[in-house]
Image (spheres, rainbow, N blue to C red):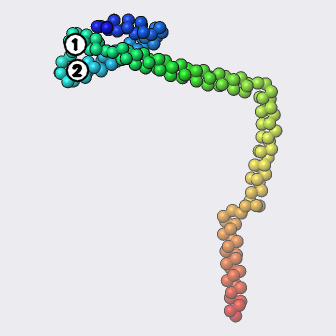
Amino acid sequence: MATNDLEVLREFQNREPSREIAVHAFGLYCQKKLEWTEHYEAQNRTAPTSAQERVWIRNLTPDYFATLIRDAREAFEVAARVVREVKDVGSTIIADVNNANSFWKQLRLALVTSILSPIIIGVLIFLGVTYRAYVPYWEDLQNKFQKASVISTEHTASKSN
C-alpha cells in the first residue's frame, strides 16, 4: 500500500493505462486530501503530522482508488461529449454560412428585394395620400357629431312646436 503522495500517483498510473486519467484521478485524490487536512485542522486546531498523513494514505482502500479513477473517466467523457457537440455546432454554422454565400441565393434575394421594395413603398405612399379620405381625423369626427347634435336639436324643437 502507498504511504506518500508519490506512491499514490504511481498507484494510479499502475491501475489506469491512460496517463491523463491517472493524473486527473491523482488531482481528485489531492483535493480529497486537502479536504481531510482542513477537516482535521478544524477539529484539532492543528495541522496533521506527516505520520498522521501516512496513516491516512495507508488506510485508502483499492475501492477508493477505483472510485477516483471512475470519476476521472466520467469527467473526460463529459468533456469529450461537450467537444463533440461544439464541433457539431461549429460545422453546422460553417455549412449554413457556406450555403448562404452561394451566388444564386444572393441573386434571388437581391431580385426579390428589388421587386418588392418599390411595390411596398408605392403602397405606403398611396395609403399616406389617401388616408384622410378613408380614415377621418379626430376633428372631422367632432364636426360630424356637432352637426348631428344641431340637427337633432332642431328636429326636436320643430316637433315640439
The residue lying furthest to the left in this view is: 45
Q: Nearer the viewer, residue 154 or 71?
A: 71
SS at badge 1: helix
The quadrant the N terminus occupies is top left
Badge 1 density bin: few <14, some 14–19, many ≥20, Cα 10 Å: few
The answer to whether 47 is drawn above or below residue 110 in the figure is above
The answer to whether 21 is drawn above or below residue 105 in the figure is above
Residue 84 appears at what percent x and percent y? 58, 21
Q: Amino acid at mark 1?
A: Gln
Q: Which residue is mark 2?
A: 40
Q: Nearer the viewer, residue 114 or 46?
A: 46
Relative placement, left or right, of 93 versus 43 is: right
Q: Amino acid at mark 2?
A: Tyr
SS at badge 2: helix
Residue 52 appears at what percent x and percent y? 22, 13
Q: Which residue is mark 1?
A: 52
Relative placement, left or right, of 53 versus 25 is: left
Residue for point 33% across, 19% down: 32
Question: Do the CB atoms of the residues marked 1 and 2 lie less than 8 Å apart?
Answer: yes
Residue for point 73% across, 61% down: 135
Relative placement, left or right, of 55 versus 65 is: left
